[in-house]
Image: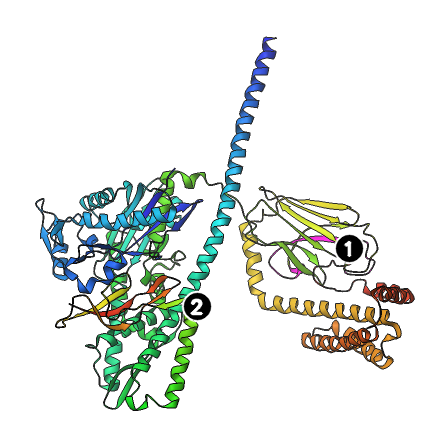
Amino acid sequence: MSKILGIDLGTTFSAMAVIESGEPKIIENKEGARTTPSVVALTKTGERLIGVTAKRQQITNPQNTIYSTKRLVGRRFSDPEVQRDKKLLPYEIRESKSEGVEVKMGDKWYRPAEILAMVLQKLKQDAEEKLGEKITEAVITCPAYFDDSQRKATKVAGEIAGFNVKRVINEPTTAALAYGLTKAKSQQIVVYDFGGGTFDVSILDVSKETVKVIGTGGDTHLGGDDFDQKLMNWIVTEFKKDQGIDLSKDQLALQRIKEAAEKAKIELSTTLETEINLPFITSDSSGPKHLYLKFTRAQLENLVKDYIDESIELIKGTLKEAKLKPEEIEEIVLVGGQTRMPKIQEEIKKIFNKEPNKEINPDEVVAIGAAVQAGVLQGEMKEVLLLDVTPLGLGIETLGGVDTVLIPKNTTIPTSKTQTFSTAADNQTSVEIHVLQGERPMAADNKSLGRFMLDGIPSAPRGIPQVEVSFDINADGILNVSAKDKATGKSQSIRIEGSTGLSKEEVEKMKKEAEVHVEEDKKKKELIEARNLADNLIYTSEKTLREAGDKVASDLKKEIEEKVEVLKKVKDSDNIEEIKNKTTELSQIIQKAGAALYNAKGDMSGKARHKTAQQAQKKEEPRKEDKKKEDKGKDAEEGEYKKK
Amino acid sequence: MEKKERRKSKTEEQLEECQKIKEEYLTNWKRERADFLNYKKEEKDRMIELMRYDKEGLILKILPVLDNLFIAEKKIPEDLRNDKWVEGFLKIKTQVLDFFKNQGLEEIESLGKKFNPNFQEAVEVIKKQGCEPEIVVEEIQKGYLFQGKVIRPAKVKITK
């Protein structure tokens, strides 16, 4: 089945999305951009340009570059809105025979729907190229205040472009759809849409099967571009105050200021202060002049306060018209790039006393929602098999009481994972598998799901046996943990039901705890790691000395033994730095021994070396027994079991 | 006997139903597997695209610095042009340009050429006697291609 394209046909920009594998996805246009300017032009050579190329030549060809057509579509010529725009738009507009509007491009007159159709056609072609399949059906969005005639004209535009228009849907409704808010029982939603050139506020009433628009308001000539303009004016004024030079007539300077203003505005959404740095902005007889201004978020908020206040008043007015109080609104959705401004989010929160929905890119949320609607019509969203995820990490306890996670949180189930571990002590013949759930790094802080022993492991030095541990969760959340000794094939397992069946509160509590303790846990883990490293080095050092016998000079041997003793003493303290320092010291000196050993044996054959090592080991056997006793219950490297 | 047959047919019905479900599940499973494998392939392409996109984003952010270097160079007073210090700084500029070139950044040549909105954005139209229309006469801001794609059009003044 071919895909249905979801299209956000905007006044200044348009975007498109489809459902792919059950998820909505924005489709980039041929130029690789996620949005396409809703601009069409006819060049002097008769070439038709659509999108960004049309916009780039706008200034050279203003009379034949048609934009903001959405403001005219489906309206009567006598409409005050058309009369107002007629004065602002640089291209010719006249009344059609049917009392509608016509615009002139080249020598021909077009209905606005025909112009919009050209934009839609480009989107169609680009989508087909990107997806590699024909697209014949579309869901197109329109503002909630569009009347029947405007909706019909939008549909006609789609049809001229070659689409079978499945639905013309309200922009605020698709925004709510993108957040999945229309599924809930009965609720009221406010959609606050602050785009580049228009501001809209809509109130939706979601009942069982329908989404009704119960209020709309806005300003068709207020947008983010006004914010940029305000900031540009401020920069020009400041420079004039400071240097006495007027930049407002200098095209080159203005171009740079425009870009810097937009950049500063965007940066101030995430930082509190930014700088506008434009070296060599101009020059006079005294030499070059540089523009350098510090600009804070508070200053920006002050500059555009009127605009924000106006938008807030419009929300209040719309609420009043719909006879609703702010506390009766369950959800707020933010649309349009300007809503990234923290002050706007703050003001909205102040009215409704709620966090607005803002996770989906506000420039794309309408197109995403249109794709979701397309998916519903196609039935693709319904057929998606819902799979659960693990709410918290699942792992086992390893040396030092560390929780080694095998299946991290948010893993889609069913799933399985296998990892090989080893023993922590010489001649360890059994390991305990302690299954844990939680987000804290230390086993003791997490929830114990169960434990079992695997014994009968043949005696071997630590680190040699290979124990394969497998976690397997089925679709019902039943966890099967098994451990197998690779040498003997002996295995044990445990079945844990309801490993994902924690209540929402429990999961949240555990996640929160992990967040609260993150610093302290990090330190704890670092300490254990340092200890494990120290322990390992002590083991290797002692082994080296044992195996080397008298090949290591007695004073060096003595020095090593001393360092080993020192490290043994500090290893169990809580002083990470001390453990690390002593570990380094021992590590350096043991390297010396290694080098000495290597030089001494330089001329021996591999076989002889092997024999010597064996002999050395034999001689030291009793000490090794002692070591084994000592090792019991001690910490070792991560990935090895705690010896019980 | 009749009862037995009826039971048999019921068992057969159940078997048929089971087989139908089995087929459906198997098909869905195969489809899911195929979806996943295809997803993996697409993901690989997406990763490459993402890395390119990431690099492109970074370069776009550095471009204003490069613009300023060019502006600064343009504004060097005549009497300082041959100064050794200035020469040294200009060498650094060359070094920066070389770096960008190695990353796949190419400058769009505009001056004296016919205006093309695929590569240029017009910011002003000026009258110039005896000149063909729509010719780029001044470059306000350089445009660039990154790995063959326009990442920023050149901002230009053109003739009427």
Residue A531 is situated, as x and y percent measured from the top left of the image, at 72, 69
Task: Find the distance from the CA under tag 2 to the CA under tag 1.
Answer: 49 Å
Residue beneath disc 2: B103
Secondary structure of the residue carrying tag 1 is: loop
Whether residue A143 appears in this view of the structure is no
Within the image, what quadrant is residue A460 found in? Answer: bottom right
Asked whether A440 falls inside the magenta stretch, the response is: yes
Q: Does residue B138 appear left or right of residue A17 in this picture?
A: left
Binning the other alpha carbons within 10 Å of mark 1 as few (below 14), some (14 to 19) or many (20 upward) gives many
Q: Does residue A187 appear left or right of residue A450 in this picture?
A: left
Residue at image point 41% right, 40% down: A380
Could you tell me which chain the residue with mark 2 belongs to? B
Residue A92 drawn above or below residue B21 = below
Residue at image point 74% right, 48% down: A484
Q: How is the image coloured?
A: rainbow
Residue A332 is situated, as x and y percent measured from the top left of the image, at 35, 55
Residue A520 is situated, as x and y percent measured from the top left of the image, at 61, 68
Q: Which residues are magenta?
A: A424-445
Numbered disc in front, either 2 or 1: 2
Residue beneath disc 1: A465
Q: Does residue B34 appear left or right of residue B121 in this picture?
A: right
Question: Do the residues at discs 2 and 1 belong to one chain?
Answer: no
Residue A281 drawn above or below residue A82 = below
Within the image, what quadrant is residue A247 found in? Answer: bottom left
Amino acid type for the residue under numbered disc 2: Gln
Quarter that holds the N terminus of chain A: top left
